[in-house]
Image: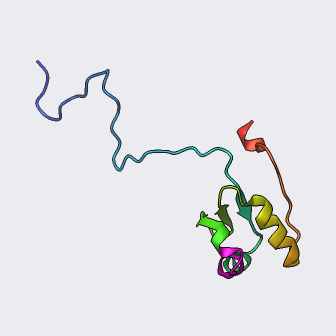
Amino acid sequence: MKPKGRAQPSPSAPAARKNDTATILHTHLTLIEVAEPEILQELCADRRLGPLIMAQLSDCVAVVAPGSAKEMVQYLLKAGHTPKVIEGGSAAAE
């Protein structure tokens, strides 16, 4: 006879985790990464560049609006920045 207490989940049931959240994988996402948080703050505040930034992921990384990568690079060059553009997958994904 099994001891009384917590019910044991069936072996076929998925394991439930506390505060379980869904993971979403985005492909073909354009990110901008800056060396200093102040630079990203300035870009977000810029009237031309700010609308092209969809979300800030950290102090130095933000998501660029879909289809706006070329426009972002052009604005950065005009503003005197020297962006390094990396296209394709990253070494971490290999």
Q: Is residue 8 left or right of residue 64?
A: left
Near-viewer residue (45 or 75)? 75
Dividing the picture into quadrants, the one containing residue 79 is bottom right
Q: In percent of the image, x 17 and y 35: which residue is there?
A: 6
Query: Which segment did they paint magenta?
Result: 42-50
Dividing the picture into quadrants, the one containing residue 65 is bottom right
Looking at the image, what colour scheme do you see?
Answer: rainbow
Q: Is residue 45 left or right of residue 90?
A: left
Q: In percent of the image, x 60 and y 65: which residue is there?
A: 54
Q: Is residue 62 left or right of residue 7?
A: right
Task: Count all numbered tags in the image, as a single digit.
Answer: 0
Depicted 65 relative to depicted 35: above or below:
above
Depicted 20 relative to depicted 43: above or below:
above
Depicted 90 relative to depicted 63: above or below:
above
Where residue 18 appears, as percent x and y from the top left, is: 33, 47
Where residue 37 appears, as percent x and y from the top left, is: 69, 75
Where residue 73 appears, as percent x and y from the top left, is: 82, 65
The magenta stretch spans residue 24: no
Where residue 29 appears, as percent x and y from the top left, is: 67, 51
Give the position of the N terminus as an image quadrant: top left
Give the position of the C terminus as an image quadrant: top right
Q: In percent of the image, x 26 and y 23: which residue is there?
A: 10
The magenta stretch spans residue 47: yes
